[in-house]
Amino acid sequence: MFRLRLRVRTRKTGAVMMARLAVLAIVLATAVPGSATTASTAAQADDGTVPVNDTFTTTGHTEPSGTATTDPGGTDSTDSTGLTFTVVPAPPSLTIAKRHAGTFIRGEDGVYTITVGNRTAAGPTNGTTVTVHDTLPAGLRAYKITGKGWHCTLATLTCTRSDVLPAGHRYPPVTLKVHVSCNARARVTNTATVTGGGDTTTHTATDPTTIRHHGHHGHHRRHDHCDRHDH
């Protein structure tokens, strides 16, 4: 997604110039996929020659960059038309999703997966740091946090990276492994946030998690530990 700004400076007969500006707006709207809007101000006198300043703004679903200037001229030898295109990239809009597999059991381990993406209609991230931070509820203790391409710190439960994420794409997931204590509540909520990359909003994902009491099948050593703790 980008914003294209077109500024026209010329001297033309008012009616003729306004007609040409209208045609130009239609061309821009049809040439660029997406939506187009125009904001126009013009000084016009009846059948007189007056300076005309016009500004066009359009949005589309491509990602050009830079600026371009052209002076196409015209049939009138007195034309002086300068077209300046300024591309303003749309900001990124990050997303975050968090999930776990199955029901957690007291005395055993569980795994959360955190996925960060960028919305389809947004611009790419700008190369600044993207930070994921997880906040565990009481009763869960993290012992490992990893993700391909992520730089993760177990002590703070944060993962960072700065590579550009295009619109409509996702980073590789972050995997968080936890141990469930014997006195964990039956239902807890894990929370993760993502910030940075040029997105000024903090995005949050929550994952309600059911924790059940262990069974006694197999007399697992961790089950025995929780039995002693419970009694």
Image (tube, rainbow, N blue to C red):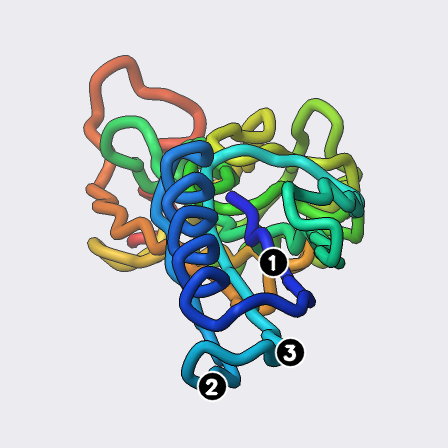
Q: Give the amino acid at mark 3.
A: Pro
Label 3: few (<14), some (14–19) or many (≥20) C-alpha neighbours in 10 Å: some
Residue 63 in the image, given as x and y percentages of width and height? 61, 35
Q: Does 144 sit above or below residue 189?
A: above
Q: Nearer the viewer, mark 2 or mark 1?
A: 2
The residue labelled by disc 2 is: 45
| SS for callout 3 | strand
Q: Does 144 sit above or below residue 18?
A: above
Q: Does 44 sit above or below residue 197?
A: below
The residue labelled by disc 3 is: 51
* Identity of the residue drawn at 59% across and 75% down: 52
Q: Earlier in the sequence, mark 2 or mark 3?
A: 2
The residue labelled by disc 1 is: 5
| Residue 214, quarter of picture | top left
Q: Does 185 sit above or below residue 70?
A: below
Residue 46 in the image, given as x and y percentages of width and height? 41, 83
* Identity of the residue drawn at 39% across and 55% down: 22
| SS for callout 2 | loop
Q: Give the amino acid at mark 2.
A: Ala
Please indicate, yes or no, whether residue 79 appears anywhere in the rendered image: yes
Q: Nearer the viewer, mark 1 or mark 3?
A: 3
Q: Nearer the viewer, residue 145 or 53?
A: 53
Q: Nearer the viewer, mark 2 or mark 3?
A: 2
Q: Give the amino acid at mark 1.
A: Arg
Q: Nearer the viewer, residue 168 or 115?
A: 168
| SS for callout 1 | strand
Q: Earlier in the sequence, mark 1 or mark 3?
A: 1
Label 2: few (<14), some (14–19) or many (≥20) C-alpha neighbours in 10 Å: few
In screen coordinates, is 116 left or right of 37? right
| Residue 33, quarter of picture | top left
Q: Earlier in the sequence, mark 2 or mark 1?
A: 1
